[in-house]
Amino acid sequence: MSLEHVLLGLLRRPASGYDLKREFEERVGQFWSAPLSQIYPTLRRLEERGLLRSHEEPSTRGPARRVYERTLDGWEELREWLESGPVRGRERFPHLAQLSFLGELQSPETTVEFLAGLRSRWVADLERLRKLAATAAFHAELGLRLRARLLEAQLVWADDVLQSLQAARG
Amino acid sequence: MSLEHVLLGLLRRPASGYDLKREFEERVGQFWSAPLSQIYPTLRRLEERGLLRSHEEPSTRGPARRVYERTLDGWEELREWLESGPVRGRERFPHLAQLSFLGELQSPETTVEFLAGLRSRWVADLERLRKLAATAAFHAELGLRLRARLLEAQLVWADDVLQSLQAARG
DNA sequence: TAAATCATGTAAGACGTTACATGATTTG
DNA sequence: CAAATCATGTAACGTCTTACATGATTTA
């Protein structure tokens, strides 16, 4: 699965589950995320399989931290994943499926509202992204640049469609 | 969940699970898909909940077909889903996560190969899409147009990155 | 007669979400 | 003292994938 590999990838340096959650938001949140309740058991499983090892560390505040690091096997596994080429994503876009059914409603206003909703969400996403991109490393930045281009294309499309819908209604 | 709603959306006219699988490929394959082994039990569940009803029909070849159609409740459910606005997709792009870790490999060739792999996949996707778009209805076509724009943006990005990588290596 | 297509499903397991449970430390 | 943050998890449930099982009809 991919979550395991993403966690291996994030563990460039030792980190706890809690740390990783934050790295998720910061480094790959644009492409992937997972709740702590999924991260913790997955780390455990990786340790059982020998891809990670862990030890406890006292925390400055709160309970003890369980800090994980990659083993050699873990690094091997990550390398193989990266070298195996781009994973084929099932790519699900439920909102585009919605769009393709929206015609049945026979309600142009609903379609327009729907598109406006998408548009404003994308504007917000793009803004967040621009702040992020300023501080990213090269390979990380590649992904962010693509995300930005995608969001821009989406905005162009939305404006396009909204305009043609409004034109059609006089 | 969304699969249930997508199935409700696809059932504009009565159809069997097998039919729906094909419609999936044709109408929403670009945004969503599901194997028959997931479609069959989901249809059953929708029937239990009263959103679909079904009856058997003899087939011209092969076993009897179970043909489903929406009930009034099913239509209501679909309408609510569509009117509730765009669903927030979790949007996972495992290949972009891969990309952001690829730097650790310290191997520009691997990165280049990776990007070339993505590029050629996208070219193929775009070609398939163009054929599809020719015969789609308005609302369906909106989604396809967006997909096309996204693929184009991805190609621009890939060429961009590949070029700058090659330039950097002389 | 072999392969493709039509047509239905079950089972096991992996993956993911949401809700719940616990408790220390720091900041307002 | 209340709320936020640090820190770990479990449980239940829902979703999705992969593999398996069955059998009729049509086409090459």
Image (cartoon, coloured by chain):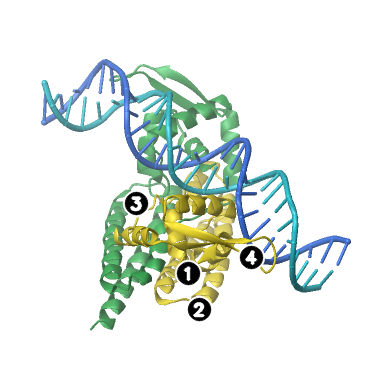
Chain colours: A yellow, B green, C cyan, D blue
Q: For the residues labelled 1 and 2, say whether their Cβ atoms are less than 8 Å apart.
A: no
Q: Which residue is the site of mark 1?
A: A13
Kind of residue at disc 4: Pro
Q: Is residue A157 visible?
A: no
Provide the chain ID for the residue under circle 4: A
Provide the chain ID for the residue under circle 3: B
Q: Does mark 2 fall on the same chain as mark 1?
A: yes
List x then y, in percent, for residue A127.
56, 72
Q: Residue at the location (28% across, 82% down)? A: B168
- Is label 2 in a helix, a strand or a loop? loop
Provide the chain ID for the residue under circle 1: A
- Is label 1 in a helix, a strand or a loop? loop
Q: Does mark 1 fall on the same chain as mark 3?
A: no
Kind of residue at disc 3: Ala
- Whole-angstrom CA distance, mark 4 to mark 3, is 59 Å
Q: Is residue B161 left or right of residue C24?
A: left
Q: For the residues labelled 2 and 3, say whether their Cβ atoms are less than 8 Å apart.
A: no
Kind of residue at disc 1: Arg
Viewer-proximal residue among A166 and B164: B164
Q: Could you say which disc has been placed on residue A135 in the image? A: 2
Q: Which residue is the site of mark 3?
A: B133
